[in-house]
Image (cartoon, helix red, strand yellow):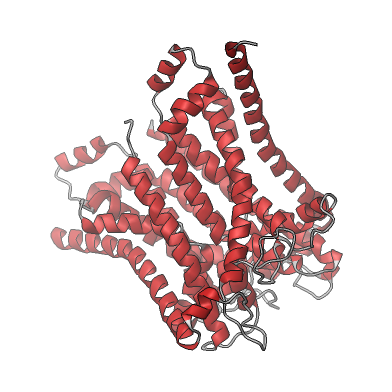
Amino acid sequence: MRKIKEYVIEKSLLSSALITIAITFGIISVLAVEAFQFFSEVSIIDFLTDSQWTPLFTDKHYGILPLLSGTLLTSFIAISVALPVGLSISIYLSEYAPKSFRKTIKPLLELLASIPTVVYGFFALIVVTPFLQQFIPGLSGFNSLSAGIVMGIMIIPFISSLSEDALHAVPKEMREASYGMGATKLQTAFKVVVPAASSGIIVSIILAISRAIGETMIVAIAAGQQPRLTFDPTVPVETITAYIVQVSLGDVQHGSIEYRTIFAAGITLFVYTFLLNTLSFYIRKKYRQKYE
Amino acid sequence: MNSITKNRLKDQVFKFWGIACTLFALILLVIFIGDIFIDGIQRIDWAFITDLPSRKAEKSGIYTALMGSIWILLLTAIIAFPVGVAAGVYLEEYSKKNRLSALLEINISNLAGVPSIIYGLLGLEVFVRVMGLGASVLAGALTLSLLILPIIIVATREAVKAVPSSIRDASYALGASKWQPIWNQILPASGGGILTGVILALSRAVGETAPLIVVGALAYVPFAPTNPLDEFSVLPIQIFNWISRPQHGFIENAAAAIIILLLITFVMNGIAVYFRNKWQKKLK
């Protein structure tokens, strides 16, 4: 009796764990099936090379490049904000700040990451864009600059927290050896600690990029809904995610080509984030516990 | 200036730069919340919470969206909690080091990084269409459950791992089966940690907008849901809808609704931190 009970329990726990595999399988097959039907109507060459994305107009073009450029542009701006600030915070907190300061600041910074993204969208559109318009006269009401900056602020804690963990894990002896040679804290930080923690820092950056690429509400609210192949940060653009939101808000018939475009856009997004996530997983796996 | 003073100077400069960056992030947080507060606080009264949405900004309330969010929260908790904890316990206590466990591990790590909008596409196809649930609260809750499952699993594993193995060994020595110490000792001992993870995951679910838009949640529903198959809206979608309208009155509404949403998020985070601190003390 007891054996049967144990067996049933183990198998039901196992099936819960297997649900996670089913989710991945579900995501890939849903995206693949709909995207496959999309590509039976639109040539993949056009999809990858056409410089216009106008599936909702009468003159239809299905080139992913404008959406991709919008996604890369906003993500690039976000990373340009989050990387220097986040990394500086992590080095300061790990190497300079008193322990008690570090303990209070870290949860406060993580509060930034817990704010719903729709709230950040509000900031970007209502606060940051009007503020920037005072300095940049040509700035459009919807633009990738303020969306990107606000997204960067949102992902600061991703970089600062994970990097700080990595820096903190570097053993004290390495620092002390460096101080013993007469090095300052700054020299020790950049020539000893940061190189030793580099894999953890790189993982935090990759995850931040992946997060930026998949971010939806900030760009849907503040970056506009005009697919445009440009790297000008002052004009409206549209990201892959914002396009999916735009179509979902409208009334699109299932089985229509418009319906399938969101899956074609989705699979593009999925491929990018999947590659980044897998890369970060292997880096973490390979270099974990180096100093333990 | 010799090189020693130069290096010390650089050191000091970086120190202040580091402080400046840290304060920069925190001050922005304060500015953002302060600005929202100024924009929205005078709009919040009891009627704002109990009124139905309306075409006129000053008559609009968040009742249906708030009820939708509560429905989503409860259903998501009911669905995701048992599955997530069971999967976490399996991975930590049962799974052997083999190819399956390696696959599960990389898979969960990967799922945690999949953009939330992709889960929306999955939910749209599987729950809304194939299972025929339509754009219902249940379809939304199932979608968000999948989204927060990896967070709950990781939190459960961490919490279970933190329970000292001496407890397990003592149980085995008394002739317990594999499951008995897990149910009677390990789960109660790791409960605080698991609870922390679940609450944090749910607070993420409350703030999610994009996957629910894709699933088909509406910006305008005349009534609060009364059963799991009703159509629904949630607070973030209501906020999104108000932000996208040009009239100033709706911006005020959006700010007011954001105050409520932030309040819910921060209270949930606060509870989670409280449980974590209490649990960590107990574990020691």
Looking at the image, is B84 positioned above or below residue B132?
Answer: above
State the image quarter where residue B107 is shown: bottom left
Q: Residue at x 38, y 30 (%)?
A: B284
Give how far across and how far down residue B139 sits, in percent: 50, 74
Looking at the image, is B59 positioned above or below residue B5?
Answer: below
Q: Residue at x 20, y 37 (%)?
A: B170
Residue A174 shows in the view:
yes
Give how far across and how far down residue B208 sits, in percent: 58, 62
**Is B88 displayed left or right of A1 in the figure?**
right
Give how far across and how far down residue B153 sits, in percent: 38, 54
Q: Residue at x 42, y 59 (%)?
A: A275
In front of the other: B151 or B13: B13
In front of the other: B65 or A22: A22
In front of the other: A262 or A279: A279
**Is A265 displayed left or right of A73 in the figure?**
left
State the image quarter where residue B42 is shown: bottom right
Q: For the N terminus of chain B, which image quadrant?
A: top right
Give how far across and how far down residue A219 sits, in percent: 65, 62
**Is B247 displayed left or right of A128 in the figure?**
right
